[in-house]
Amino acid sequence: MTTATNALACLIAGTLLAVGLPAVASAEPAEPVPVVHYTFDELTSLGAGATLANTGSGGAALDGVVSNTGAAVVADESGGSAVKFPGGAGASTTAPFATIPLGAVAAGQQDITLTARIKLDATANNCQWPFMIGESRTKYLFATTGCGSGTYGEAVDGSVRATARRAGVLGTGWHDLRVALDGGSRLYYYIDDALVASTATTLTAADAAGSTRSGWLAKSPYGDAFFNGTIGDFAVYAESLVDIDDTWSVFTSSLAFADGDVVKVHPDETRTLALPTTGGVVWTSSDPGVIDPLTGAVTPPAEGVATVTLSATLASGGETRSASYTLATSRPAAGDPYGYLMVHFIEDANGYAEKVYFDLSRGDDPTKWDRLNAGDPILASDLGSTGIRDPYLVQNPTTGAYYLMATDLRVFGCQPFTTGGREYDCSQHGSWPAGANLSRELVFWESDDLVNWSEPWTLPIAQPDQGMAWAPEATWDPLAERFVMYWSSKTYPTTRFPDQVASEAGAYSKVQYGFTTDFRTDYTYGGVMIDKGRNVIDTTIYQYDGRTYRISKDNGDANVGIWMEATDAPDWWLPTTTWTTVETAIGKADYGSVEGPLMFKDTNKDAWYVYVDQYGGSSQGYRPYRVTGLETGDLDDILFTKMSASEFDMLSTTKHGVVRPLRLDEYTALRKADSVSSIAPVAVETTAGEAPALPETATVSYEDARFGAARIERAVTWDQIDPGAYAAEGTFTVTGVVEGVLPDQQFSADHAETLRAQATVTVLPPPLTLEAVASTRCVAGKVHIVASIRNADDEPAGIVVTSLYGAKTVTGLAPGSTASVVFTTRQTAVPAGEVAVGGTSASGEYDGGAAHAAASCG
């Protein structure tokens, strides 16, 4: 092909639409010029040793060379020439391929783009490499048509790897592939002009380049199958050819805030906004004193709200993209909404983890979570089965008391116990999913402050025809001033506790309800809330703007699964209430088996979150969705959007529970109860000119009056050290961020000195360089040991040589000079040994030695 590949058309044309503010008019950008460009139009036949003429700027020195026979010249779809490679097994020594000579990548080169026009006659998932830059398994940049059920571009340098993957292998027919590396920033992968994947990376073009060749066509360094397909055009550019709109899209999707967001900063914390600079984005601020555009540091006013506009601008190829984000920032008062508490349990088949855990939001961010109490449980039960699942937290608005309720069920490591007066010896524990004669009581705790909790108690809930009580929740009824409590129970048509038959026909789970004011003695069973004639469990209730939303799990109809419905009825718990379905099969398409939904609102904007609990496989735990549209009042406006892994931070073991929005005073009490008391400082030594070896972990101490003390080793990411700090003798300090400790949002008023790990580095003088050798010789039948010391340094040195037979001193040994000392042993034979050599100069020391062999003069 004689023209540039179609994948570059949009870059050359300069017709991209602006995003945000209008693009700035500018001169037409110059057409990119490849270093390597194989059009194949000069070819009429191919054989071993054939040349692929380079029409790029690198000239004939980068002509490709064909190895082996079997490749053929064919017509491409535009009438030009192309090369058909027949493929072959990875171990083949006869399959044809082409070599790109050394020189396609310059020393120190940052950016690079590979483009190719290829054709596949059949799809394949055997890791074929149509093209690559690099020379080995540890240095390359390439694209594969199908490997591991996906197609992707990848850059590798040793253990550093960046992969931009799209699910699904490449289809048959002609395709334009483009792999662009924005050195030290991001790897982009295009198929047929469309960006299909990208990933952040520190790699550059030079990192992936080879030292004996530039690369190959149709061959893999891994021994994968040779490429079986047609290449109509191949080019290498010494620049990153990325569409500006694609860079802009990657940039905007990485933002952790949106226009109109509220940024609250705790009175005792600092806050930094992440301001990504993808592709060279430049930030400005309407008030740098409040939000610094360089560091992202947020400094709200002492009182009131400050409104700041942040502006981001990207310039590339003569075009610009811009957008502005207006943020309101303040320091909340004690009773203002601030932060979130998640109460949940953990699934661990190999350990006793069915207890109550607390996770606290990272500041006021409902998408970032930190587990409290150093990851250990907050509450555990010694009642009933001693297992706790599905915890739920409520507060009585009239008394302020908090109540925590949970299912009494220990799935793993069953212990004999009594439930409802019946002895349970675990012999039938394998049938626990049926719920017969089991988990009939709920477990409760009470607290005035979310920090100090009562001893647990149980309340019998299940009726005689109900086999269990699972996943309890409660919602306050302001008219009757009582809680409506609801849970799921499997109901048996004929058998009754304690003689229920797990396999009884017609038994299935229904959602029940009852009423209570204290979860202790004032309890009345109400009846059945949901009966669909099949298993329904895990109902959660969320109320907003006078409307009640109900989310449940239908285990009897896979097409329904987790579904949401809504009603405006005040007596929403009654089975006669009319409900309108909002959404069905929530989470099924993305995660398969899910249950245990929860729902809560972002207290700063009209955004909600629904979590579903994935189960049944190796992947376990909550998976979040962002929900919008409730604020309009129109159920048709409600939209569920899956959150990507980069949009939230939550430990994968987080299972069925509840999220409660907090007030500032509640958040502060929890954070301070769990705060880090200290991070142990460390001391490190190095010599001048050598970078210090800092420890990989630091010892973090958690001191908590209720939960005790803990000292845990946590990984440290140390700040980068200026080489000038250790260039000469002296002392300096370096700090680092500790995993699980929040340097931006710990309470500086109490722990200012403990927010980061700190290492004190002592830089010792550079070592004195001496070269010492020892030998033996016979003199008058006696062994003499001779030590020769050369001063290989640039300063005079004093030398002390010590052996079993005494010590000798050499003063003022000049640079480059050698001195010898002799020890008379007065022995006819000596074993192998060593002499010790010490030295000092004006700026260094030496401590070493030299070995000598055994000797005999008899």
Image (cartoon, rainbow, N blue to C red):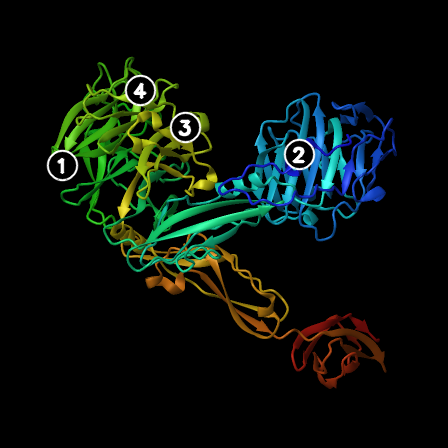
* Residue 468 shows up from this direction: no
Percent from the top left, x then y, of residue 178? 66, 35
Percent from the top left, x then y, of residue 653? 41, 39
Sooner in the amino-acid sequence: mark 1 or mark 4: 1
SS label for mark 1? loop
SS label for mark 4? loop
Label number found at residue 9: 2
81 up-or-down from 674: above or below: above
Q: How many angstroms separate mark 3 from mark 1 (CA)?
A: 35 Å
In the image, farthest residue toward the bottom: 811
| Image quadrant where one finds the C terminus | bottom right
456 relative to 208 in the view: left or right: left
In the picture of the structure, the residue carrying the numbered disc 4 is 535
Which sits in the foreground, 392 or 568? 568
Which sits in the foreground, 25 or 92? 25
Which sits in the foreground, 795 or 394? 394
Q: How many angstroms separate mark 1 from mark 4 (CA)?
A: 29 Å
Kindly check if marks 1 and 2 are in contact, taking CB atoms under 8 A apart as contact.
Answer: no
627 relative to 719 in the view: left or right: left
Kindly check if marks 2 and 3 are in contact, taking CB atoms under 8 A apart as contact.
Answer: no
Q: Nearer the viewer, mark 2 or mark 3?
A: 2
Q: How many angstroms separate mark 2 from mark 4 (CA)?
A: 57 Å
In the picture of the structure, the residue carrying the numbered disc 1 is 517
* Residue 673 shows up from this direction: yes
In the picture of the structure, the residue carrying the numbered disc 3 is 587
Which sits in the foreground, 767 or 409? 767
**Residue 135 sits in which quadrant?**
top right
Q: Nearer the viewer, mark 1 or mark 2?
A: 2
